């Protein structure tokens, strides 16, 4: 994969400043020989850039595999902040967004999603041993402690809905900052996805991940790939390729294994339409 994207760091940077000069339906860009601009944030293991800017993480692996199945290999990675993903798509600076984005009603009001590529729960990173027993939002609220979360993540709204005061919700730019807040004691827990929590607990001494099953099923969400509303035909073709023998296949599972995606993350029969209406 690395050779395919070698040297694209510079073009990705240019894409961020090119504005909407090349904006328009994705099919028109492809017909004109332009690359598909793949937008994602640095949020391992979902999506993150490699040392040469190549798109890594299981959401990117799935997206690239499906695009290749559709016959598209001219891809330009564009790395941006998490909070800038949807604005970049709507402004025409990118064509497709990954990053592990939950299909939520408020997002569906602005962009369109593919059918789900996985389902995921919520967990917390806490000091080793979880001395305060912070494995649910209710426990965090009742303890009166501060929880850290990534600005723009669904965890912020979840904490608010659980009754945690805004001044007890530390909104930070990314996962690295959430980890730092918990390590330093500025936050008692970090609310993130169960995959991210497990990944951080494996890589950082003194940090544990809580069990996602401590929270009810209502805290599970479905992840999709984001498309501009004008690209309905392309999104429909993407869905067809995704569901035509790829999703859950041996080839897919082998490609995502190194990024902690497991069989229990495969989506059930929940549709993007249902998730938009119920999440």
Image: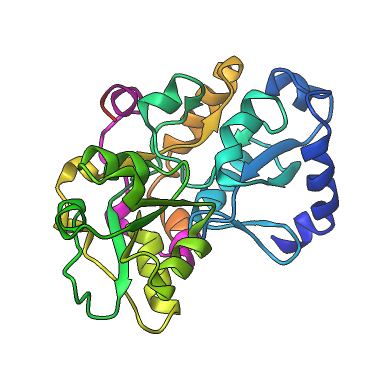
Question: Does residue 262 appear in the picture of this structure?
Answer: no
Tell me where residue 48 appears, x and y as whole percent.
59, 57
Tell me where residue 62 appears, x and y as whole percent.
52, 48
Which residue is depicted at the point 76% across and 27% down? 30
Question: Relative to residue 115, is residue 279 drawn left or right?
Answer: left
Name the quarter where the N terminus is drawn. Answer: bottom right
Question: Does residue 250 appear in the picture of this structure?
Answer: yes
The one nearer the camera, 188 or 80, is 188
Name the quarter where the C terminus is drawn. Answer: top left
Q: What colour-coding does the image apply?
A: rainbow
As for residue 256 lying within the magenta part, the answer is yes
Tell me where residue 132 appears, x and y as whole percent.
18, 71
- Residue 179 in the image: above or below residue 213: below
- Residue 108 in the image: above or below residue 219: above
Question: Relative to residue 207, is residue 65 drawn left or right?
Answer: right
- Residue 8 in the image: above or below residue 51: above
The one nearer the camera, 206 or 226, is 206
- Residue 241 in the image: above or below residue 229: below
Main SS, magenta residues: helix
Q: How many labels does the image show?
A: 0
Question: Relative to residue 115, is residue 168 drawn left or right?
Answer: left
Start-end of magenta stretch: 255-277
As for residue 88 lying within the magenta part, the answer is no
Tell me where residue 95 appears, x and y as whole percent.
66, 31
Which residue is depicted at the point 69% across and 33% down? 94
């Amino acid at each position: 994969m690395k050779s395919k994207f070698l040297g694209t760091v510079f073009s990705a940077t240019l894409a961020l400043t090119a504005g909407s000069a090349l904006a328009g339906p994705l099919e028109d860009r492809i017909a004109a020989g332009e690359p598909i601009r793949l937008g994602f944030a640095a949020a391992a293991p979902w999506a993150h850039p490699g040392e040469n800017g190549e798109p890594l993480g299981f959401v990117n692996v799935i997206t690239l595999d499906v695009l290749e199945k559709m016959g598209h290999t001219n891809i330009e990675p564009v790395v941006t902040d998490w909070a800038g993903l949807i604005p970049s798509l709507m402004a025409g600076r990118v064509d497709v967004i990954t990053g592990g984005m939950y299909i939520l009603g408020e997002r569906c009001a602005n962009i369109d999603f593919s059918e789900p590529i996985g389902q995921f729960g919520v967990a917390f990173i806490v000091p080793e041993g979880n001395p305060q027993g912070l494995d649910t939002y209710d426990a965090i609220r009742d303890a009166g402690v501060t929880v850290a979360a990534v600005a723009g993540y669904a965890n912020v709204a979840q904490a608010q809905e659980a009754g945690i005061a805004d001044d007890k919700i530390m909104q930070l730019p990314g996962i690295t900052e959430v980890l730092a807040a918990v390590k330093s004691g500025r936050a008692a827990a970090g609310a993130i996805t169960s995959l991210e929590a497990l990944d951080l607990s494996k890589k950082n001494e003194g940090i544990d991940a809580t069990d996602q099953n401590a929270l009810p099923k209502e805290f599970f969400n479905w992840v999709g790939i984001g498309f501009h509303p004008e690209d309905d035909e392309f999104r429909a073709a993407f869905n067809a390729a995704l569901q035509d023998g790829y999703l859950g296949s041996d080839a897919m599972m082998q490609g995502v294994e190194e990024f902690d995606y497991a069989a229990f993350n495969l989506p059930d029969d929940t549709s993007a339409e249902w998730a938009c209406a119920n999440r």
